[in-house]
Amino acid sequence: MADPATVARRVFSDAALAGLARLDSEAWHTRFYELWTLGEAYIKARGLGLTIDLRKFTFRVDEKTGVRVEFEDVIEDDEPAWQFWLWRPGDGYQGALALPSLAHVTDHTRIAGIQSE
């Protein structure tokens, strides 16, 4: 990946950049990868990929309240329609998941699970 600071300036919203600017170096890198994976999870969940302008939505990550998203009008989506999770499967790895909230699941949305042995 290119320099994370360069990538952030190119793809994150002004609000996300302002939030990053308030962090020390270690926290900055942690948050960068959280925001990156959340954005990637969202655009993949929408099925629209990079046709969605990444600068037009902002994730707010809080230890107490979790993850929430804020969309600019051009995104044409509803913030409460989504649930987001972050996890670290191991050192040096960051994961994120975006799913429609259960209150917004339609007949066309299927959420499947499997029990492992």
Image: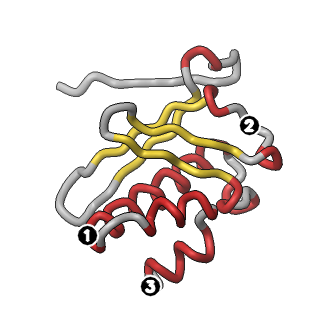
**Quadrant position of the N terminus in the picture:** bottom left
Q: Mark 1 or mark 2, which is nearer to you?
A: 1
Q: CA distance from mark 1 to mark 2?
A: 32 Å
**Residue at numbered disc 1:** 26
Q: Is residue 39 above or below residue 26?
A: above
Closer to viewer: mark 1 or mark 3: 1
Q: How is the image coloured?
A: secondary structure
Q: Amino acid at mark 1?
A: Glu
Residue at 63% of width from left, 24% of height from top?
Answer: 109
Estimate the x, y position of residue 28 in percent, counting from the top left: 35, 67
Left or right of 16 on screen, residue 62: left
- List the residue tagged with mark 2: 77
Give above or below for 64 relative to 8: above
Residue behind mark 3: 3
How many neighbours does mark 1 have within 10 angstroms: few (below 14), some (14-19), or many (20 or more)?
A: few
Mark 3 vs 2, N-terminal side: 3
Farthest-out residue, front: 22
- The amino acid marked with disc number 2 is Asp
Q: Position of residue 110 (x, y in %)?
A: 58, 23
**Which image quadrant for residue 4?**
bottom left
Of the 4 image quadrants, the one containing the C terminus is: top left
Mark 1 vs mark 3, CA separation in Å: 15 Å
Front residue (pair 17, 86): 17
| Secondary element type, mark 2 | loop
Q: Residue at x 37, y 41 (%)?
A: 62
